[in-house]
Amino acid sequence: MSKYNRNNIPRVKHWYDEQVTNVFDDPRITAVGLLFEAHAGLSARFTAQLEEHGLSAVEFEVITRLARSPGNQLRMTDLAAQTSLSTSGVTRVVDRMERDGLLTRRACPTDRRSSYAVVTAAGMQRLNETLPGHLQMIEQWFTGQLDPEALTALLDGLRRVRDAAHPCATAGSDDADPEQTPDVDGAARRQ
Amino acid sequence: MSKYNRNNIPRVKHWYDEQVTNVFDDPRITAVGLLFEAHAGLSARFTAQLEEHGLSAVEFEVITRLARSPGNQLRMTDLAAQTSLSTSGVTRVVDRMERDGLLTRRACPTDRRSSYAVVTAAGMQRLNETLPGHLQMIEQWFTGQLDPEALTALLDGLRRVRDAAHPCATAGSDDADPEQTPDVDGAARRQ
DNA sequence: CGGTTATATTTGCTCAAGCAGTCGTTGGGC
DNA sequence: GCCCAACGACTGCTTGAGCAAATATAACCG
């Protein structure tokens, strides 16, 4: 439904000019709507599947971030920086997940202000139970909906938008991690 | 690291060797991450701008939906169906906006169970003050980040994902969506 | 050292949102 | 006309999240 470029005549003005029939139906708003609804749709699908495994979306994000980090652990602050949560939000999620046995707190040996959130064995097991279904959902509702070129184009576009708009929440995620790896198998030992 | 190569003896390859570092960096998860982070980034930018005009993202969505509806009004239930809110959520957001003078409730003449939420003059004025800046934000952080073809490709991909995954409104109502014009932003995490 | 500032986490408070239940209203079947 | 299921809006309750203050520790600087 190429609502936006209904004709291919090169134009001086913007791509949306002719379609503005009503201020509130502006195609720019529609574009945002597409992105937001795609997000909402996927979010709902994922939430439903995660719930079957007793995880909320936030908990899944937390445990995934931890599980991909060295030692299956992160300091609370770093965890907050990598997720959509504030530090107090992280405190409370970790509270709940600790109560449920999925995580443990561990004191940082070099800085007594800090503490690590560590995935327990039970947490890793839960994650391993959940992940295959989750990946299946992603394929079913997202990546599998598009052929490879379309998917690549979509991801390229998203990456640009993300890089432009994202308020540096993933600051420390992909870069080299100068932090020394503290004791990989501690998770099993502590509990 | 030390766990796996604590001594230099060549090890037998275990089933998990390639997974311990990779499973959680699966490109499918990365793809979802891009979409979600793009959404989060835009959402944060929009929220900041709307806040300057005294509107939350939800309030903006509500007032926009109403403003594009005939008579600048909708029944509460219909408003709920068009937004990311449940009916009780709509009740409360309309409460607040009515208190702030942006909306009014009006009794439905034909069905005394129903009531309409109507945008007041003050509400329309607020929206008109807010909208240009909002559109500017969309261009700045979203549509303006991409050249026309890339934008078209992005929107095409999003539309497919949206059509596949969007649970036809959110809470409760699961009808097909005959409406041609998609939506405005909303739902922050919301999830 | 002693004092000041910065950092890490937790806690109190507030608020927005959903669910489930309530109340009044509607409309169909008889 | 009467009954009852369906519907629309609202309310009580709970939950999850953020902000700001509190607490503890670290780092720095004289």
Image (spheres, coloured by chain):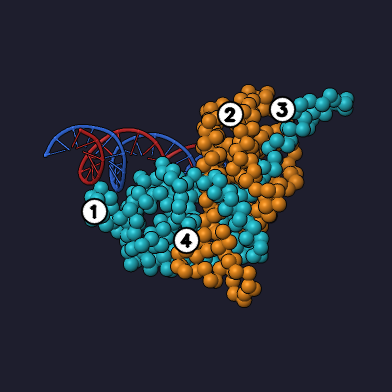
Chain colours: A orange, B cyan, C red, D blue
What kind of residue is marked 4? Leu
Q: Is residue B2 above or below residue B155?
A: above
Q: Which residue is mark 1?
A: B110
Q: Is residue A86 above or below residue A60?
A: below
The front one of D23 and C8 is C8
Badge 1 marks a residue whose secondary structure is: loop
Q: Residues within 10 Å of mark 4 (few under 14, many from 20)?
A: many
Nearer-N-terminus badge (3/2) = 2
Q: Which residue is mark 3?
A: A185
Q: Which mark is residue A102?
A: 2
- Which chain does tag 3 point to? A
Measure the C-alpha gap from mark 3 to mark 4: 47 Å
Quadrant where the N terminus of chain A sits is bottom right
Q: Residues within 10 Å of mark 1 (few under 14, many from 20)?
A: few
Q: Which residue is mark 4?
A: B50
Quadrant where the C terminus of chain A sits is top right
What kind of residue is marked 2? Leu
Badge 4 marks a residue whose secondary structure is: helix
Q: Which mark is residue B59?
A: none
Q: Quadrant of residue B2?
A: top right
Measure the C-alpha gap from mark 1 to mark 3: 69 Å
Tell us which disc is closer to us: 1 or 3: 1
Q: How many marks?
A: 4
The front one of A136 and B59 is A136
Q: Is residue A59 above or below residue B79?
A: above
Q: Left or right of A125: which side holds D17?
A: left
* Percent x, y of residue C23: 21, 40
